[in-house]
Amino acid sequence: MFARIAPRYDFLNHLLSLNVDRYWRRKSVTLAAAQPDAQILDVCCGTGDLAIEFAHRLGPNGRVTGTDFVAPMLELFRAKVAGTALEHKLNISQADTLALPFADESFNLTSVAFGIRNVADLERGLREMRRVLYPGGKAVILEFNDTHHPVFGPLFKLYFSKILPRLGALISRDSRAYTYLPDSVGKFPPRPAFLKLMEQSGFSNCHVHSMTFGVVSCFIGTKP
Ligand SMILES: C[S@@+](CC[C@H](N)C(=O)[O-])C[C@H]1O[C@@H](n2cnc3c(N)ncnc32)[C@H](O)[C@@H]1O
């Protein structure tokens, strides 16, 4: 599915979120508070927008590795940064989040934006993100959540389940992808359950920062 929608993925992200997705990624990078020389792994990186945001904030010795298992998404990521000053701070490689090809304790921070929901085995994905962290390293997870805001909640549900799938289908020419989005968000655990799952997966000091009336959450946990 992601291979099919890749060419229109960025355009649709910005259009369907009215560009607020840029703010969500920027805010998550601020919350992550990575050191300038951090070694960061961004899994399910897609076309690389979160990895790029991290790379902008790192010093000359910081590096971001972006991994995804869909080659057309990674091609778009490569094309975006080719020839720019960020290129030397980024490694881009094809990998499954459920079996990351990195040794234990290789990174200071692992991140994922709008990707963990898609990983077939949530706990295994989280455990992989933890495994490759140094002790004291952080995982930063940005994801949609069902919002129960009294005013914005019903409006958001209407937009997400009725308007977004139609607009998405029209522009991406893929009738399933943008029906999958609200379906998969509906199946994603509520905030307290996801925080519990992070703890079960070996993270401590797990907490969540809610954005845009609870539509999006940034979860942060530390590897003890
Ligand atoms: C909604 S996109 C998010 C992309 C990007 N992080 C962003 O913020 O726009 C989800 C991505 O997760 C990837 N993905 C899903 N399951 C994966 C897995 N098990 N291993 C690697 N990538 C995966 C998909 O290929 C897709 O590119």
Image (spheres, helix red, strand yellow):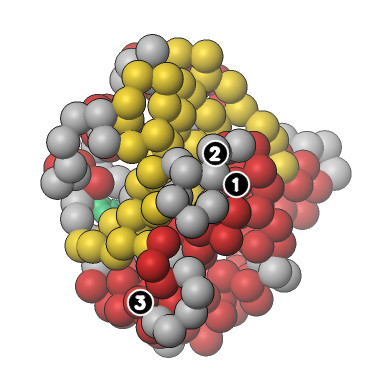
On the image, the x and y values in percent for residue 125 come to 28, 37
Direction from residue 120 to residue 188 in the image, left or right:
right
Whichever of labels 3 and 1 marks the residue nearer the N terminus, that label is: 1
* Residue position for label 1: 29
* Residue position for label 3: 78
Res 111 label = none
User: Dividing the image into 4 quarters, which one contains the N terminus?
Assistant: bottom left
- Closer to the camera: disc 2 or disc 3? 2
Direction from residue 152 to residue 158 in the image, left or right:
left
Whichever of labels 2 and 3 marks the residue nearer the N terminus, that label is: 2
Direction from residue 148 to residue 189 in the image, left or right:
left
Rendered view: 217 above or below 114 = above
On the image, the x and y values in percent for residue 61 come to 44, 51
Residue type at numbered disc 2: Ala
Q: Name the foreground residue: 204 vs 143.
A: 204
Estimate the spatial distance between the alpha carbons at disc 2 and disc 3, rounded to whole Å.
Answer: 23 Å
* Residue position for label 2: 34
Mark 3 residue element: helix
User: Dividing the image into 4 quarters, which one contains the C terminus?
Assistant: top left
Q: Are marks 1 and 2 in contact (CB under 8 Å)?
A: yes
Mark 1 residue element: helix
Mark 2 residue element: loop
Q: Residue at x 16, y 36 (%)?
A: 103
- Closer to the camera: disc 1 or disc 2? 2
Rendered view: 107 above or below 79 = above
Observer able to see residue 7: yes
